[in-house]
Image (tube, rainbow, N blue to C red):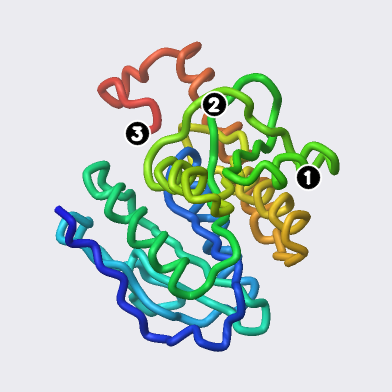
Amino acid sequence: MGDVEIHRTADFKKLKRPTLIMGFPGTGLVGSVAASQIVESLAMEFGGYITSAEFAPLAAIHDYKPMPAARIHFSEKLNMIVIISEMTIPIGSSQDVADKIYEFAKSVGASTIISLGGISLQEEKKGVFVVSSDPNVVKDIIAKKIAKPIKEGATTGVTGILLAKGALDNFPVTTILAESSEEYLDPKAASNVLKVLARMTGVQVSTLKLEKEAEEYSKDIKDAVLKSRISKKKGPSANEGGSMYG
């Protein structure tokens, strides 16, 4: 363990106390989907990648081009860095990944780290929640009614470690969590996260693509549920050896 490395392909020297956004897979894949939308919508440049012997051996393919699954993008114009992973970070690597991201954030003079993700809750439909190591962020969230703060609970993985480090080091680390489905990709939740992020940072990210995908997913899911109900009523087809659709 302890072999996680961040490889820079840009120097980031023109960035001045940038905002660092982080999006990793999790509930509804909200974090990685939202981060990917930021990178695409804002046409961010490729700035580096993260490696570890513990990572899954895969490459992400976007617009016909293979890329590292865990990578860094940035925008000098918006003074922003995005760290995105399209693979699940192994539990055993979480501490090392969090440490390296924290070190990277400090080295580029980041003003804050904001993690995007999903949370499975039943209390309200499609709610968005915020946890922060900075009490001022929580106060602002409450005052502006941007999202709901979480008073009690726990968060795990890289984000959980970063929140704890930020609290101990008086460094602002915040996570935005949209209520999301656990069973399937949830672009609507990713859209909800980005809307809250926009209100917090002032950086607008188009969510039209995610909204359209959400409508299509919703229709597909409803169709699947309907077909499932019909199949239960009809029973298996005798003509196809028990297969309903043949």
Rendered position, 134 above or below 20: above
Tell me the CA gap for discs 2 and 1: 41 Å
Q: Earlier in the sequence, mark 3 or mark 2?
A: 2
Of the 4 image quadrants, the one containing the C terminus is top left
Q: Which residue is mark 3?
A: 246
* Residue drawn 67% across the image and 77% down it: 78
Q: Position of residue 173 (x, y in %)?
A: 55, 51
* Residue drawn 57% across the image and 55% down it: 114
Which amino acid type is marked by label 1? Asp
| SS at mark 2 in the image | helix
Query: Quick check: 204 left or right of 144?
Result: left
Query: Quick check: 211 left or right of 104?
Result: right
Marks 3 and 1: CB-CB under 8 Å? no
Which amino acid type is marked by label 3? Gly
Tell me the CA gap for discs 3 and 2: 19 Å
| SS at mark 3 in the image | loop
Circle 2 Cα neighbour tier, 10 Å, few/some/many (<14 / 14–19 / ≥20): few
Q: Which residue is mark 2?
A: 225
Which mark's residue is nearer the viewer, 3 or 2?
A: 2
Which mark's residue is nearer the viewer, 2 or 1?
A: 1
Marks 3 and 2: CB-CB under 8 Å? no
Which amino acid type is marked by label 2? Val
Given the current orientation, which residue lies at the most extreme right position? Answer: 144
Given the current orientation, which residue lies at the most extreme front position? Answer: 169
Which mark's residue is nearer the viewer, 3 or 1?
A: 1
Q: Earlier in the sequence, mark 3 or mark 1?
A: 1
Q: Which residue is mark 1?
A: 140
Tell me the CA gap for discs 3 and 1: 57 Å
Q: Earlier in the sequence, mark 2 or mark 1?
A: 1
Rendered position, 88 above or below 183: below
